[in-house]
Structures are given as structure tokens and as C-alpha cells.
Image: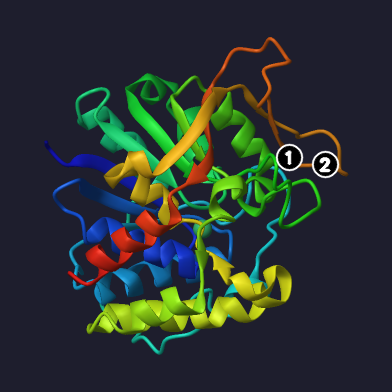
Amino acid sequence: MTARKIIIDTDPGQDDAIAILLALASPAEIEVLGLTCVAGNVPLALTAKNARIVCELAGRPEVKVFAGADHPLVRNLRTAEHVHGATGLNGPKLPDPAMPLQDQHAVDFIIETLRREPAGTVTLCPLGPLTNIAMAFRKAPDIIERVQEIVLMGGAYFEVGNITPAAEFNIYVDPHAADVVFRAGVPLVVMSLDVTHKAMVTPARNEAFRALGNRVGVAVAEMTDFFQHFDLEKYGSAGAPLHDPCVTAYLIRPDLFTGRHINVEIEITSELTMGMTVADWWGVSGRAPNALFMGTIDDEGYFALLRERLALL
Ligand SMILES: [Ca+2]
């Protein structure tokens, strides 16, 4: 099996950080061509800095990190410092990065990479608002059919919303970009809140990260300690959902997840339900399926995979 080539589009974010660490710890399955950063959890300057902090934590300063869109296509930027802290990566004390940010714009890197690599061999892994991906598809529509697959964290159906009663954060922040991506015709795998709310970091699971015996394990535990303060109020004693690593875990162990191939469209008109992922779970619309919308996870297997791989860093 050859490693799958991916671009991780990200707004770190503690859970983004863990998703990136899992990918970098899994070179047999995943080749990270680059990290493209977007404004989301925190503004772009911080996500572009945090992505490099995470690469250095993984001992991988040669990974290429690009800055992309600093605001959504249409709406004003909405950030989430209330969850992730002022830096977006609150929790562990990690040094400022020494590795450089690439000069090229993230959108141009995405376009250039998809044109350079053989068609159907590059997977996009968005972990934040879909602004960079939509901009690339609009600027260079020829790349759309060259994408192997998009595996993203975003949306919800049964779990409805986490930033408004109707919408999940990543889709809500840039619903117009999400609309472009969901209509593009690229095979989509959607890790929704329906899955990630079943991927809970319990206190015991977090202590297992801390006990891995390396710097990464302690840093991951401290990241989770931080965002649990917010999530424990919201979700109670079950712990905090570990959203974004579901994307990179799927690339390694797709068998951990199940879902349905259904039609998913994005609400971009109603202010009340803006950014809702209208998922035709019961097949009532007659609209053609465009996404594998995930609904379940083997959470024990997921955390076992995370422990196994993070211990390697
Ligand atoms: Ca994220």
C-alpha cells in the first residue's frame, strides 16, 4: 500500500493539532504534502503560527505550511476563542516556531499541487471553514475533477448545531464556501457532529495520553485539559468531543466509521438556520447523493489508534 497524498486545510485549534499529529505519525498510510491555514477558530495569523508549532512538536519542521484566506467569502469572520483560548492552542506551553511560513498563498499551493500530481491521487482534508478550498475551486475549476476525495470535519444532522441551534461551527463560519464545495461533485466524506460527539475524551482517555511517555503525549493531554473546561460545562462528565482527528483517523482506519451515502446541501439563505447541513438521511428529497455522511464511530478503536500513533512521535 502506498501512502495517500493529502493536503490538510486547517485552523488550529487543539483538535486540529491532534489531527495533524496523527497524520505526521502515520507515514505508511499518509503523506502530508502541505498544511494550508485558514481563519476559523482564531484569526489567520494565529492558525498559521499554530500549524508550525504543531509541526515542530512532531519533530517535522520541513513540512510546508501556507497561509490562506483571512476571512470568509461573504460573511464576517466568527472565531471561537471561547472554546480554544486566546491563542487557539491554549493549554501546553510550546515554543514559538522557528520554521518559516511559505511565501506562496495557500490557495495557489492547492491549485499547483493538484495540477502537478497525477489526477485522482490527492485528497483534501479540511478541518476548518472551507474558504480556501472554495477559493481554489473558483479560481481553477480544472482542479476539481483531479481531487481524489475530500474528507472533512463539519456539519451535523441528528446533533444539529454547536455554534447556533442549527449549525456546526466550520460550516457556519463560511456557509457560502461550504456550498461551493458540497456542490462541486468531488467525492465527499463528512465527519459530522453525529460522529464526533461519540468521540469523547474521558478523563481516563486523557490520562492515557499523558502517560504515553513522550512530549507529544503530555502536550495533547494539556490541550485537552484546556478545552475540556468549556466542554465539561456543555456536555457534562462524558468529556469533550475530539472532532478533527476523525478525519485523519479515517484515512488510516476507515473501518472505524459507518455512515450513509446521501444528499447534503448547505443553508445559505435563512439567517435563523444559516450554515445548516441539510442531510437527506432518510432519502426523502430525491436529490442525488453527494456525500458519505458519517454517523457512527468505534470510539475505543479510535482512541487506541491515537495512543498507538502519538506514542511514535
Ligand atoms: Ca478545526
Q: Residues within 10 Å of mark 2 (few under 14, many from 20)?
A: some
Work out whether residue 57 or residue 77 is closer to the camera in this orientation and state it. 57
Q: Is residue 61 above or below residue 180?
A: below
Work out whether residue 188 or residue 307 is closer to the camera in this orientation and state it. 307
Counting every numbered tag in the picture gives 2
Q: Is mark 1 within 8 Å of ligand 1?
A: no
Quarter-of-image position of residue 271: top right
Quarter-of-image position of residue 232: bottom right
Q: Is residue 102 visible?
A: no
Q: Is residue 185 above or below residue 80?
A: above
Q: Is residue 228 above or below residue 265?
A: below
Q: Is residue 184 above or below residue 83?
A: above
Q: Identify the residue under disc 2.
A: 273
Q: Looking at the image, which residue is at 56% across and 57% down?
A: 70
Location of residue 226 in the rendering, given as x and y in whole percent from the top left corner: 54, 82
Q: Are marks 2 and 1 in contact (CB under 8 Å)?
A: yes
Q: Amino acid at mark 1?
A: Met
Location of residue 253 in the rendering, given as x and y in whole percent from the top left corner: 30, 44
Q: Looking at the image, which residue is at 60% across and 37% down?
A: 178
Q: Is residue 35 visible?
A: yes
Q: Quadrant of the C terminus?
A: bottom left
Report whether 18 appears left or right of 157.
left
Quick one: which residue is furthest to the bottom in this view? 93
Which SS class for mark 1? loop
Location of residue 36 in the rendering, given as x and y in whole percent from the top left corner: 39, 52
Q: Is mark 2 within 8 Å of ligand 1?
A: no
Q: Looking at the image, which residue is at 59% across and 56% down?
A: 197
Which SS class for mark 2? loop
Q: Identify the residue under disc 1.
A: 276
Q: Looking at the image, which residue is at 24% across and 65% down?
A: 308
Q: Residue 74 — which label?
A: none
Q: Amino acid at mark 2?
A: Thr
